[in-house]
């Protein structure tokens, strides 16, 4: 019996080790019936994109708290473009100043979730964007 | 078909997409699987199993790195349980294989067991074929070995590496009870821990109880985090594979697993057809008639079979058009 | 208390429950069926002497400065001297951070606390590919002694005490600090401060590890040994529960896992042949101050008592200083909200109050805007003023351990100690803390608590003001601190210039010596000092050690 599942990659680019948020979100998405691939700390943009390709995920969720998002998020989006990947959405989370958000969205991040986010908002966004 | 051409060239996206199709919609996937079948059968398939936390992923990671140094292309299928309550899964095996994701000649795919039940080995076998067709020469299938379902998965492999470690307590009982007989090579990981020698003796004693065979499963020691003993495991694997090839064992194993695959597919196909063509209301009617002794179950089954066969033929015709 | 007296109280309580209380409950039911502490422990309606039936003052509390130190590690506590007000700071380049430190000192801060950027914490130079985008972001970027000299320019190292949040490469930063002191003509026995140097909680919760456990523990014991001889006033480690709590643990788990880490360090040092009463007086701790005021106070007191018992009974430490748990506290960053950020000032006040009532030795108060960005100067000043108001205006510092004897606080203290000890026993059974980490046991316990906490907020079982109740439409605050994006480029230029001008033969020689020492069992500190003096970079030193020691891979259990 096959059943369709939303597949999500939860990745931590950059060097910060604060994975509480990433892990809480990973669990919440699992409990919402999704398949969540978690790859651990210190992932390079190349590793993240390569993993997303092999796992054929629908969503890439990036978590970062170090402030390096302005550099690393666009880098990941660039690599996705280079690999002609158009069927994945990218969302981000962490301590991200609001003034950075328009720029990140323009670069192609679908949504940015900052501290205090209700995990149900993340789940709803994914379910709305990914119809399976 | 473009995707097939790409797959045969080793395109990672094509492989990834086809695997998703296998997981999401097998009937659709079959169309492609039929076409790639002639290109499969080349790869060596190695099952890696054992209780949770013994270091399966780390050993897979180390073995893969060694193989890559020799230029061997590697595929890895890492299977983790789907939560029966929520239907979701957390797939975390890649954490221990982080370095591999930068290597374009290594393809790793994480799979949840979903609701497949017996069908999981079907999805696994199909995924193996996809990796095989894309040119992977060695394919590792990694599962948590705790029950019969997992045992079935690794049965699709040419050989099985059974991993354990000292200090597992009762878990050794699980190995004894369930999956002991499937190991072709045993690995005691974290061998620097207390109780290693005792565990090895225990495993050897259990193996001694098995009927005498030409291949005596060796028990090897590793410390995967530092790489100690991995070379030994690698050599033993290939020693065993060439033994299998020379003794005709490989042919026998593959024949067995093909037999099982066909029978399983057949069973499942008829199960699906049954759900598709025997309408629920109709079935209820039939049951009522049987209870009222208006019909007997034997005749009914024959009648239902006729319906299935006719519907199936009609379906095929529709499909061809 | 006399048995007879307890019996009487029990009787009276029963009467009270059946009459007055019953009537009241019938008319005015309570807000909830059950009440819980911030950590999810059930709280009774009322605490009385019945809860402390087995309480013995001398055994359970004793006197401040005396075993088991429940009431505090000094006999007079804050009547002698206030706690050290120490704000964690650092960002961008060494020049910018130096300016911030001098500002804080001029505002009455009494100790420095250095934040390093992530590349520095993980052993990468600023020009390493992994450092891209991270240089100077969460702290100051230090590549070599040159940066360290700038960082402490015009700050006399014999006058300040300096805490450095540095773990995997702690030996290197300590060596740099010592060489800066050398150049300021400050003798090593005058140096006061702390290196965090707590690798175990990096594996558990914080993530800035480099080497695997065994060589990491060796580096730590090398530091213990070296410091006890060379810089006797230096705190060689700050065993940290702070990050464990930030990762989502409960108060009990924070105490349990921190003290379990402490046990592992003491054991490792003893196995390396050190005498317990030589190194143990320099062990220090670092805890979190979370929202539940009374539970937190109890937590600090329980931790103090439990550690004293562990040191005395388990390890046979004789020197009272070895038995004392001295600790730094930081208010809980994870409780700060991005919504209505000024509310955070009140949260921080309550948390700081808990730390003071709990007898902390030093304190960092978070700034209101830290859920949004690094704090700006105004926010940091308010945070510091919070401590000053507590010290000078609130009156809580005028007597020692003012909450002692409260039926509730003493009951909580007992319970936290008891439950933490249960965890420690479990970890012992698993084979010690390193095995428990490798098995993912500790991480998973913390993750379960973190997930539970989140769910409680989402189900409105836990109210966070401004987040799931009393929300308003608000504008995003202005004037947040931005780290100059040029920092990375400037730091790389500086690094490349250094590599051209330094004596590169000396660099090679000192690295070769270090490599040889790493292969032997020699104490590595003197070799690292030599490298530092020759302006070898942090990344170069770490690369040599990585080659010899290998790198740690996280063990995550999901």
Image (spheres, coloured by chain):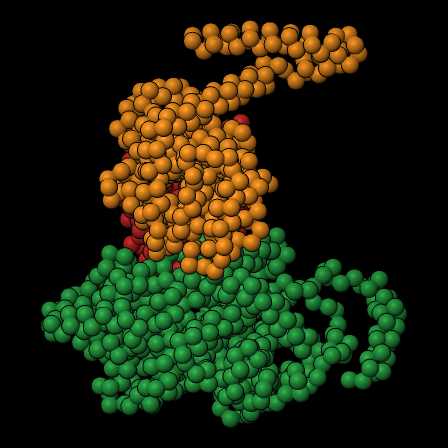
Residue closer to the observer: B288 or B224 = B224
Residue closer to the observer: C455 or C299 = C299
Rendered-image quadrant of the N terminus of chain C: bottom right
Residue under the point 48% across and 46% down: B204
- The quarter of the picture where residue C513 lies is bottom left
**Which chain can be seen in orange?**
B
Residue C131 appears at what percent x and percent y? 27, 59
Above or below C482: residue C86: below
**Which chain can be seen in red?**
A
Q: Indicate the colour of chain C.
A: green
Residue under the point 45% across and 80% down: C283
Residue closer to the observer: A75 or B28 = B28
Q: Is residue A14 left or right of residue C452?
A: left
- The quarter of the picture where residue A59 lies is top left
The mark total stands at 0
Residue A106 appears at what percent x and percent y? 33, 46
Residue under the point 64% across and 84% down: C61
Q: Is residue C553 visible?
A: yes
């Amino acid at each position: 019996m096959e059943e369709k599942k939303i597949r999500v990659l939860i990745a931590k680019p950059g060097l910060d080790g604060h994975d509480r948020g990433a892990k809480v979100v990973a669990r919440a998405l699992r409990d919402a019936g999704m398949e969540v691939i978690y790859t651990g700390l210190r992932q390079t943009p190349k590793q993240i994109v390569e993993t997303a390709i092999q796992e054929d995920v629908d969503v890439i969720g990036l978590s970062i708290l170090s402030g390096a998002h302005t550099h690393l998020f666009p880098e990941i989006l660039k690599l996705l473009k280079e690999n002609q990947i158009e069927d994945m959405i990218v969302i981000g989370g962490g301590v991200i100043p609001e003034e950075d958000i328009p720029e990140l969205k323009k670069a192609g991040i679908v949504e940015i979730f900052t501290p205090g986010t209700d995990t149900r908002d993340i789940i709803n966004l994914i379910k709305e964007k990914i119809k399976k | 078909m473009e995707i097939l051409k790409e797959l045969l060239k080793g395109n990672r996206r094509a492989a990834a997409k086809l695997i998703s199709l296998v997981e999401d919609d097998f009937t659709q996937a079959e169309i492609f699987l039929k076409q790639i079948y002639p290109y499969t059968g080349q790869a060596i398939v190695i099952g890696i199993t054992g209780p949770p936390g013994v270091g399966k992923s780390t050993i897979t990671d180390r073995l893969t790195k060694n193989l890559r140094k020799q230029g061997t292309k590697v595929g890895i299928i890492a299977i983790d349980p789907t939560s029966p309550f929520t239907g979701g899964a957390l797939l975390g095996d890649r954490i221990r294989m982080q370095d591999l994701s930068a290597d374009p000649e290594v393809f790793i795919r994480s799979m949840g067991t979903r609701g497949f039940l017996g069908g999981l080995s079907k999805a696994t076998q199909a995924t193996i074929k996809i990796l095989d067709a894309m040119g992977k020469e060695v394919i590792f299938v990694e599962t948590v070995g705790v029950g019969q379902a997992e045992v079935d998965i690794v049965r699709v492999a040419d050989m099985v590496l059974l991993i354990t470690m000292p200090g597992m307590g009762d878990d050794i009982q699980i190995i004894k009870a369930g999956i002991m007989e499937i190991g072709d090579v045993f690995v005691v990981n974290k061998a620097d821990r207390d109780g290693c020698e005792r565990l090895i003796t225990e495993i050897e004693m259990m193996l001694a109880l098995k009927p005498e065979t030409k291949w005596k499963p060796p028990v090897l020691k590793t410390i995967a985090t530092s790489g100690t003993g991995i070379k030994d495991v690698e050599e033993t694997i290939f020693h065993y594979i060439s033994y299998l090839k020379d003794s005709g064992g490989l042919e026998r194993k593959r024949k067995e697993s093909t037999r099982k695959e066909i029978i399983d597919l057949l069973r499942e196909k008829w199960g699906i057809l049954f759900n598709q063509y025997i309408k629920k209301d109709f079935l209820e009617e039939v049951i009522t008639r049987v209870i009222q002794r208006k019909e007997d179950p034997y005749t009914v089954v024959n009648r239902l079979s006729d319906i299935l066969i006719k519907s199936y033929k009609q379906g095929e015709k529709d499909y061809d058009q | 208390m006399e048995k007879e007296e307890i019996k009487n109280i029990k009787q009276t309580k029963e009467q009270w429950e059946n009459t007055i209380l019953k009537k009241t409950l019938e008319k005015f039911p309570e807000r909830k069926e059950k009440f819980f502490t911030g950590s999810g422990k059930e709280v009774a309606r009322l605490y009385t002497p019945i809860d402390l039936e087995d309480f013995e003052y001398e055994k359970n509390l004793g006197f401040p400065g005396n075993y088991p130190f429940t009431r505090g590690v000094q006999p007079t506590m804050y009547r002698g001297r206030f706690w050290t007000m120490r704000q964690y700071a650092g960002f961008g380049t060494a020049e910018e951070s130096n300016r911030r430190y001098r500002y804080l000192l001029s505002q009455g801060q009494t100790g420095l606390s250095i934040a390093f950027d992530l590349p520095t914490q993980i052993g990468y130079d600023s020009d390493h590919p992994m450092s891209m985008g991270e240089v100077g972001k969460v702290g100051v970027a230090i590549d070599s002694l040159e940066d360290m000299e700038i960082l402490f320019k015009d700050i006399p190292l014999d006058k300040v005490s300096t805490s450095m949040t540095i773990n995997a490469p702690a030996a290197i930063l300590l060596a740099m600090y010592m060489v800066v002191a050398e150049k300021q003509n400050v003798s090593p026995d005058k140096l006061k401060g702390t290196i965090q140097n707590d690798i175990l909680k990096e594996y558990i919760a914080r993530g800035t590890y480099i080497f695997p456990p065994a060589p990491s523990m060796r580096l730590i014991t090398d530091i213990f040994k070296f410091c006890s001889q060379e810089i006797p006033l230096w705190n060689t480690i700050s065993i940290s529960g702070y990050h464990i709590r930030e990762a989502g643990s409960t108060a009990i788990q924070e105490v349990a896992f921190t003290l379990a880490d402490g046990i592992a360090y003491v054991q490792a040092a003893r196995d390396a042949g050190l005498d317990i009463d030589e190194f143990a007086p320099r062990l220090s701790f670092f805890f979190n101050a979370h929202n539940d005021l009374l539970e937190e106070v109890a937590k600090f007191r329980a931790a103090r008592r439990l550690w004293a018992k562990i040191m005395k009974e388990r390890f046979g430490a004789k020197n009272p200083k070895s038995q004392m748990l001295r600790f730094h506290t930081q208010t809980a960053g994870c409780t700060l909200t991005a919504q209505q950020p000024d509310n955070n000032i009140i949260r921080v006040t309550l948390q700081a109050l808990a730390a003071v009532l709990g007898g902390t030795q030093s304190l960092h108060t978070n700034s209101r805007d830290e859920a949004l960005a690094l704090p700006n100067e105004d926010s940091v000043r308010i945070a510091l003023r919070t401590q000053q108001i507590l010290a000078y205006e609130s009156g809580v510092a005028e007597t020692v351990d003012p909450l002692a004897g409260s039926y509730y606080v003493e009951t909580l203290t007992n319970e936290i100690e008891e439950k933490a000890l249960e965890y420690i026993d479990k970890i012992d059974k698993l084979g010690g803390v390193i095995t428990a980490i490798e098995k993912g046991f500790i991480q998973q316990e913390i993750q379960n608590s973190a997930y539970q906490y989140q769910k409680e907020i989402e189900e409105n079982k836990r109210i966070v003001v401004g987040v799931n109740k009393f929300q308003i439409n608000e504008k995003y605050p202005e004037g947040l601190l931005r780290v100059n994006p040029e920092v990375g480029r400037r730091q790389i230029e500086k690094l490349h210039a250094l590599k051209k001008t330094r004596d590169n033969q000396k660099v090679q020689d000192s690295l070769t010596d270090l490599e040889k020492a790493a292969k032997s069992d020699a104490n590595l500190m003197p070799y690292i000092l030599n490298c530092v003096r020759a302006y070898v970079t942090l990344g170069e030193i770490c690369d040599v050690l990585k080659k010899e020691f290998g790198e740690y891979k996280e063990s995550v259990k999901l």
